[in-house]
Image (spheres, rainbow, N blue to C red):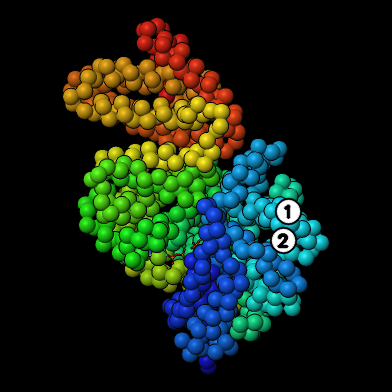
Amino acid sequence: MVQRYVMAIDQGTTSTRCILFDARGRLVSVAQREHQQHFPRPGWVEHDAVEIWRNLGRVVPQALSDAGIEAGQVAALGIANQRETTVLWDRRTGVPVGRAIVWQDTRTDGMVDQLAREPGADRVRRLCGLPLATYFSAPRLRWQLEHTPGLRERAERGEVLFGTIETWLIWNLTGGPDGGVHVTDVTNASRTMLMNLRTLSWDDELLEFFDVPRVMLPEIRSSTEVYGTTSRVVPGIDIAAALGDQQAALFGQTCFAPGEAKCTYGTGSFLLLNTGTTPVLSTHGMLTTVGFRIGDEPAVYALEGSIAVTGSLVQWFRDGLGLISSAPEIETLARTVSDNGGCYIVPAFSGLFAPHWHSEARGVIAGLTSYITKGHLARAVLEATGWQTREVVEAMNADSGLALSTLRVDGGMTADNLLMQFVADVLDVPVVRPMVAETVSLGAAYAAGLSVGYWPDLEGLRRNWHRAAQWLPEMDLARREREYAQWRQAVALTFGWTRPAPAATPGSDVTELVQADHRRLEELFRGLRDEQADRDLLTAELAALLTAHAAATERVLHPSEPGPDVSADVRAITEPGPEGEKALLRLENAVDEHIRGEERGLLNELRRTVSPAERLGLGRAFAAERARRLERARAGGPDPRGGVQL
Ligand SMILES: Nc1ncnc2c1ncn2[C@@H]1O[C@H](COP(=O)(O)OP(=O)(O)O)[C@@H](O)[C@H]1O
Ligand SMILES: O=P(O)(O)OC[C@H](O)CO
């Protein structure tokens, strides 16, 4: 009998790959082609959908011929794709309306800000699981409808089709204008902001909110089912699965059970945690998304921490700055120095995604001195990926109530040992990589193979997972926490860059004032740890600031939970000997936790839900209340709160 194989297409942000797998999940052949990235204006990122389709037409026959395999030996085809990127095309001709707008594109920043203030904005997240951000498809679909003359009318007449990349490819593979099937899978649909997370169908309220005509949308289908048979490129192959690439990686890493998680390190990095058949809404900046849906079974959901820029920062270092000539050279350059020299790079090129969701942020290089060399910059580039992972893992742990115990990784950046060691160090958990690094393609192949009975069940697939590499944490706690605090300080510098409030005094937005207090508190703790410092003086300022900050926060911002009373520790830190030191450590930890909670929860919430003008107003109220309390504390007057509370 002729041996059969499964074909996977991974249509990623930078390239299109076709990979053939055998029944044991081993890679038989790979063909790949990059496509051009178009950056027509700052913050704009576009792809030519026709170029991507043509590349597919080349890699598929090439993968088959390299392996000496006929189309008839392919049991099924699975597609994994870059998500959220939007393509619009003419139903009759198949010609795209302009270029595809890529998930990294931030042109809708102003529109998103405006939408966030419209009635119904507060319901969006509950309906679709996603925060209002430039990242997702609906805002840019609306942008296209508004900015392309005549497009809305054509769309309403049913002449224009919308799709994410898998929809575009499936439509073309199954005939294009001659009977092409217009479908999407539920994981890709869950990234549009137009699908209801519970009903798994297009949601009328969301369609109205984003003003999108339903007639242009594809039919939402399961992740594993036969959508149609190819009639172009290589005819006669069943297209039996489609998944967003990050969900495909979750599948390829065999994270089939609740609690299992993976992080894929490519252009961006995406950590997904399987949460089972009920969607979990995040309170810490994670996305709720569909992980996969097998046939008619209930959908499996995931929490996702999306990081926009990781590998693309390495690409920028290579192509934009020309400091290296290939991506792997970054590791060699970073190893010329032993640390980052105090330098941090926050790559907010597309704003900041999880857990911050600041579309208006832009990148910074912080901590520059004349000591910094390109070696330090190379380290800072790699470390940016590690710290961003840490932020996401902390938020994920807070949402799930569980501490991640091991991180399964995959993707192009996992070839970098220095980086993977750094990730293990800053997370303080082991990091493991499987034998097949092409996890996205493997996941698409697994899904397609399951769909047509090539593989019988999930358990069989699990047995194919083998560990190829492991990194164990080595960094000491004090360094980890010290550097993380610096990283967070650098992150705060990126906020608000593209949206300076015209009539505002700099720094008078309430979120900035709260953050300025946080940074001063951190400084005071650094001072208190210095043996030469005047501890009494610093403690007095610390107590006054903590009291004034907490009172102003409570009065103006109404946080949902009161913080702990730390009066005893504040008093004890001036005691000589180990008791004083222990109290200082306890207090610093408690304040640190408070700061992180407030920055991630309350402040992010304010930025998302309250307009800049209102935040300025709140800022004035906050500053007044804080000043009143500080004055009272300095004058030694009684504090009605009766102690120091966070
Ligand atoms: N040795 C390396 N060290 C750091 N980054 C790397 C290394 N090798 C590749 N990369 C980065 O990984 C990314 C490619 O990974 P890949 O998984 O193919 O991405 P994608 O699927 O998003 O196109 C590129 O952005 C590249 O800069
Ligand atoms: O194509 P990748 O690997 O960069 O993944 C992109 C993501 O799907 C964007 O959400």
Q: Which amino acid does label 1 sit on?
A: Val
Relative to 189, does residue 287 appear above or below in the rendering? above
In this figure, which residue is indicated by the disc labeled 2? 217
Q: Is the distance from the Cβ of mark 1 to the nearest ligand 2 atom less than 8 Å?
A: no
**Residue 398 place in picture, x, y as percent:** 46, 42
Q: Label 1 crowding class (10 Å Cα cut-off): few <14, some 14-19, many 20+?
A: many
The residues bearing labels 2 and 1 have C-alpha atoms spaced at a distance of 9 Å
The residue at 41%/7% (across/down) is 638
Relative to 175, does residue 224 appear above or below in the rendering? above
Quarter of the rendering occupied by the C terminus: top left
Mark sitting on residue 301: none
The residue at 66%/75% (across/down) is 172
Q: Is the distance from the Cβ of mark 2 to the nearest ligand 2 atom less than 8 Å?
A: no
Q: In which quarter of the image is residue 378?
A: bottom left
459 horizontally vs 95: left or right: left
Between 46 and 85, which is closer to the camera in this rendering?
46
In this figure, which residue is indicated by the disc labeled 1? 212
The residue at 28%/54% (across/down) is 374
Q: Which amino acid does label 2 sit on?
A: Leu
Q: What element carries label 2?
A: loop
Between 555 and 38, which is closer to the camera in this rendering?
38
Of the two numbered discs 2 and 1 on the same chain, state the one appearing first in sequence. Answer: 1
